[in-house]
Amino acid sequence: FAYPDAHRYRLGANYEQIPVNRPINPVYNHERDGYMSVNGNGGDAPNYFPNSFDAIEAD
């Protein structure tokens, strides 16, 4: 067995939902249209940041 299989055997199928294994912050990697993507992919929004479609913010 590979190591992830050992995880599932010891902790159950939902081991990623255990609070110590869950990420604290959401992931914003700005990657879109990847392999087998099934979600909305950000809709019609541009896939680059910063972009000219957003309002300019003062520093």
Image (cartoon, rainbow, N blue to C red):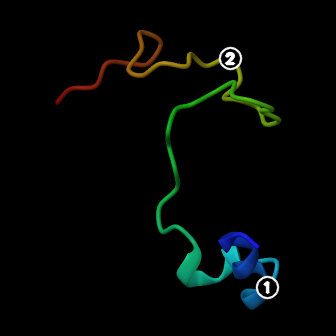
Q: Residues within 10 Å of mark 1 (few under 14, many from 20)?
A: few
Give the label on residue 44, or none.
2
Residue at the spot 77% in from the left edge and 79% down from the top edge: 8
| Local secondary structure at mark 1 | helix
Residue 16: quarter of image = bottom right
How many labels were placed on the picture?
2
Where residue 59 sits, quadrant-wise, is: top left
Residue type of the residue flagged with mark 1: Tyr
Pointer 2 local density, CA inside 10 Å: few below 14, some 14–19, many at least 20: few
Q: Pick the quarter of the image with the N terminus.
A: bottom right
Q: Residue at x 42, y 14 (%)?
A: 51
- Residue 42 location (% of width, % of height): 66, 29
Query: On the rendered structure, is 23 left or right of 4?
Result: left
Q: Residue at x 61, y 19 (%)?
A: 45
Question: Who is closer to the viewer here, 25 or 56?
Answer: 25
Instruction: Look at the picture and state if 46 lies above or below 33.
Output: above
Q: Residue furthest bottom?
A: 10
Coordinates of residue 5 in the picture (x, y in percent): 76, 74
Question: Disc 1 to disc 2, how far (Cα)?
Answer: 42 Å
The residue where tag 1 is placed is 9
Q: Secondary structure at mark 2?
A: loop
